[in-house]
Image: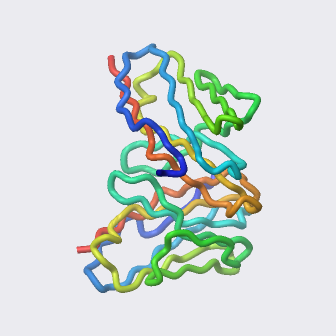
Amino acid sequence: AAGVIQSPRHLIKEKRETATLKCYPIPRHDTVYWYQQGPGQDPQFLISFYEKMQSDKGSIPDRFSAQQFSDYHSELNMSSLELGDSALYFCASSLGQGGETQYFGPGTRLLVL
Amino acid sequence: RKEVEQDPGPFNVPEGATVAFNCTYSNSASQSFFWYRQDCRKEPKLLMSVYSSGNEDGRFTAQLNRASQYISLLIRDSKLSDSATYLCVVNRGVTGGGNKLTFGTGTQLKVEL
């Protein structure tokens, strides 16, 4: 079965640069979530979209923005990168937003030097 | 205090042992409950949803006590391949404050020969 696709899988950036992470949800899933997992930490919710509209917002820095497109894929844009942004970024998708199971992609590992 | 608390472990058990993980959550508005499994540097994968009536999937049994805000996971006949971090996860749902997953810090399990 098709899973959540994330690209790139690995990314190395320097401080103050920008990065764009992409997420392609499972086909027919209409809700996308972004999570950040720092080293030795549990995943922290950043932001979510349902039917191309932002549905919830967590601990996402103002330097980050995201959107969901008409084909339901989502992009997380990160600017003015800081060393502390180095983490695993997971995208998850679900069908609906009523507590349905969220399925995670393999993640993008971002390293900021 | 974290919204979802778990004993971080590690739990080192011999193959074939039975092991139990516990989890408590502080937000009574939580509506959905899950156990996810995460292997090192990989994405969280759904192990099972947790229901008040309790549910079983092969060697895994999960229980939810809403009154005590307590969730458990029992693994019987442990296999080497069960070695991973087990994440207790709650979702408040759209009406409870947002359809985002809140993770516990995870309990690390190591099954040994």
**Front in this rendered view, residue B111 or B50:** B50
Task: Identify the residue at horizontal 69%, vertical 63% (top origin).
Answer: B97
Left or right, A75 with respect to B40, comes to right
Q: Quadrant of residue A18?
A: bottom left
- Residue B41, position as x, y percentages in the image: 37, 50
Question: Which quadrant: the C terminus of chain B?
Answer: top left
The answer to whether residue B28 is above or below residue B76 is: below
Q: Is residue A68 above or below residue A9?
A: below
On the image, the x and y values in percent for residue A38 come to: 37, 60
Residue A107 higher or lower than B78, as above or below? below
| Total numbered circles | 0
Q: Is residue A20 left or right of residue A2?
A: left
Where A57 falls versus B46 (above or below)?
below
Please provide percent x and percent y for residue B95. Answer: 77, 61
Q: Is residue B70 shown to the viewer in this render?
A: yes
Q: Look at the image and tell me whether residue A95 can be seen.
A: no
Residue drawn at x 38%, y 27% is B11
- Residue in the picture at 70% in, 80% down: A70
Report the front residue among A21 and A1: A21
- How is the structure coloured here? rainbow
- Direction left: furthest residue: A113
Identify the residue shown where x is 70% and y is 37%. B66
In the picture, measured across the screen, residue B53 lies left or right of residue B113, that is: right
Judging depth in this view, the residue of B68 and B6 nearest the camera is: B68
Residue A46 relative to residue A80: left or right:
right
Which of the 4 image quadrants contains residue A31? bottom right
